[in-house]
Amino acid sequence: MIAIIDYGMGNIHSVKKALESMGARTVVTNNAALIKKCDKAVLPGVGAFGDAMQELERRGLVAAIKEHIEKNKVFLGICLGMHLLFESSQESCGVKGLGIFKGCVKRFPKKKSLKVPHMGWNQLQLKEKKCPLFNGLADLQSVYFCHSYYPAAKDSKIMAAMTKYGIEFPSVMRQGKVFATQFHPEKSQKAGLKILKNFVGL
């Protein structure tokens, strides 16, 4: 069973529909006890870093997420859900993230030629080709992005894929059984569904 963590932010139901189309059994929940019972969990999200952390804390979900990860269970963060796994974000100065990944989330640099948010299709440059999310996936596949901030991880070894948009930034992270995507796999058609299928099969 895959817990899709509901903290009041994000495209929960499109994630649920995409996972179930890949054969997954899912439950959308904000119940910490139920999340702890599931063998996999997904943290989706669209919105602001500070508001999201406030909601996770208010609903008692921070401890449940950390316990899930500490027990070496499979976990996936999507878009804002990826950002929340970091220590902090320039979007909400002074707000602590979950701290699973070391580093900060930064805003794209101001350039006349660079439209922010980064919205639309862009390519994945597979760096860790043995990452299980990439099984059967060719390099330079296009996936769908929608974000104004990007993760700046301290450890380059956990950057599984990169994408270029003014700068090069990590678009897939992998640390043990914790995975995260900056793009939306549920909106990325064939390539995104393949990644979700691989996640379901872990």
Image: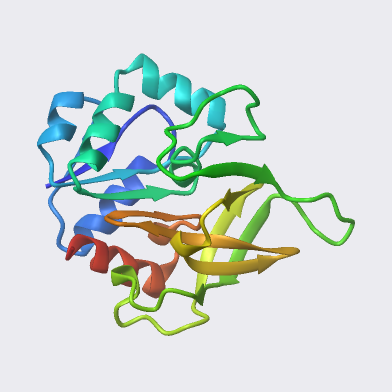
Residue at (39, 43) in percent of width and height: 44
**Residue 192 x %, y %:** 39, 67
**Residue 122 x %, y %:** 59, 70
**Residue 101 x %, y %:** 45, 45
Q: Is residue 69 left or right of residue 191?
A: left
Residue 137 sits in which quadrant? bottom left
Q: Residue furthest right?
A: 112
Q: Is residue 125 left or right of residue 167?
A: left
Q: Residue furthest top?
A: 58
Q: Which of 67/13 is in front?
A: 67
Q: Which of 11/53 is in front?
A: 53
Up the image or down, 169 lies above or below 97; here it is below
Up the image or down, 176 lies above or below 5; here it is below
**How many marks on residues?**
0
Residue at (55, 61) in percent of width and height: 170
Q: Is residue 115 left or right of residue 18?
A: right
Q: Is residue 128 left or right of residue 88?
A: left
Residue at (66, 68) in percent of width and height: 164
Up the image or down, 95 lies above or below 104; here it is above
Residue at (36, 28) in percent of width and height: 7
**Residue 73 x %, y %:** 19, 48
